[in-house]
Image (tube, helix red, strand yellow):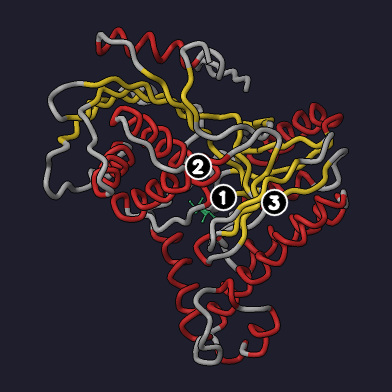
Amino acid sequence: MQNTTGQPTTAEAPLRLAQSFSARFASTPRIFRAPGRVNLIGEHTDYNDGFVLPAAIDLYTWTATSLRNDGRLCVYSENLGESSEIDLAQEAPAPRDDWSDYVHGVALMLQRSGIPVPGCDLAIFSDVPSGAGLSSSAALEVSVASALLALSGLSLPLSELAKLCQRAENEFVGARVGIMDQFASCFGSAHHAILLDCRSLEYKLLPLPAGITMVICNTMVKHGHSGGEYNDRRAQCEEGVRLLSRYFPSIKALRDVSAVELESHRGDLPDLIYRRCHHVVSENERVLSAVAALKSGNLKEVGRCMAESHLSMRDDYEISCRELDLMVELAQGREGLVGSRMTGGGFGGCTINLVRTASVVQFTTEMRAAYHQSTGISPEIYVSTAGAGVTEVTPHG
Ligand code: GLA
């Protein structure tokens, strides 16, 4: 990943982090790297036990760490230039409402699953933009959890690690997120998207079509997740399940409701709850249609599913915003575009665009200019390949 911000590039980051760690803590660290993710389709379906299709991207959070002997975590954020201390023996720790909650939450969940977390120095650097819908939170959780786990000398299956990180965010940070982001950060695979069944956690790796590139356009409008809107959507889905289970007693989640069943009881649901359910039920169908289309090389159908997904989030789920809608509109009809939609939790952040590789340079140049002309904002655009999940790295990568 290239950048023009004066930050280290992906290749330089671990060495720079190791050097700064050694200068600060006077020891040689181990380094763990976890990626952000982009979701191709399947938004807000994960906590409804549905299907998602994310891919890990080549933007990462690195955690450098070594042992200390006083039962404390001393954490330094390279991005913010801030330190934070956590006492691992504290009985009932409270969140501080800042970035250190992700570190603390993960340490706490490791302890609660019986892993004795040792005192550690940690330094963290990330090039996943925060609040952009690219899972900076999950990348931080997974990177720190892997580092703490390794220093404890124990190991966990990756799917347990993903679930533990989700619990840290649900129970300590206070955002009722689903499993998609942590799973993608753990299970990412080069050149593949991940079709995940969020109920069983069974997954299949799906090769991205040759000659297609993921172009992620950041509106630069930031969202926040522990904020109410995300949790509200989740509660509205639960209300939908509660109301629909009067007619379909066996349903446990919106995953279990078909489009026909939902329509047959449209009149029994408040309009808002109906529209929330309609998004989720139709989005699950679109994930499966998009996967079939990707497998058979029907890129036109992939584009149609992405376009419908965006409209569903705009109109039914109401999680888009003016800038996201504009970014999707500006992509329409451009040379090489396969499909475009907002990606991630919503209320700001990025669009995912699948673009024919030969047209990527023209596409990004034109999108940058068009968005700037309409809004006065210079968007960041990330051209990413699908990458690997969490791993330990050396300072040289
Ligand atoms: C956020 C959450 C995920 C998922 C998406 C929406 O990224 O962390 O669990 O719900 O929003 O698809």
Q: Is residue 193 left or right of residue 47?
A: right
Question: Which residue is pictured at 36% across the width and 52% down the height?
Answer: 167
The relative height of residue 70 versus residue 15 in the rendered view (above or below) is below
Residue 135 shows which numbered tag? 2
| Location of residue 279 in the rendering, given as x and y in whole percent from the top left corner | 63, 69
Label tally: 3
Q: Which residue is mark 1?
A: 344
Contact, mark 1 vs mark 2 (Cβ under 8 Å):
yes
Q: Which residue is mark 3?
A: 341
Q: Of helix, strand and loop, which one carries label 1?
A: loop
- Disc 2 packing (10 Å; few <14; some 14–19; many ≥20): many
Q: Is residue 308 left or right of residue 8?
A: right
**Cα–Cα gap, marks 3 and 2:** 17 Å
Does mark 2's beta carbon lie closer than 8 Å to ligand 1? Answer: yes
Residue type, numbered disc 3: Arg
Q: Is residue 99 left or right of residue 373?
A: left
Contact, mark 3 vs mark 2 (Cβ under 8 Å):
no
- Disc 3 packing (10 Å; few <14; some 14–19; many ≥20): many
Does mark 1's beta carbon lie closer than 8 Å to ligand 1? Answer: yes
Q: Of helix, strand and loop, which one carries label 2?
A: loop
The relative height of residue 318 versus residue 221 in the rendered view (above or below) is below
Question: Which residue is pictured at 33% across the width and 54% down the height?
Answer: 174
**Cα–Cα gap, marks 1 and 2:** 8 Å
| Location of residue 334 in the rendering, given as x and y in whole percent from the top left corner | 85, 41
Residue type, numbered disc 1: Gly
**Cα–Cα gap, marks 3 and 1:** 10 Å
Which mark is in front, 3 or 2? 2
Residue 35 shows which numbered tag? none
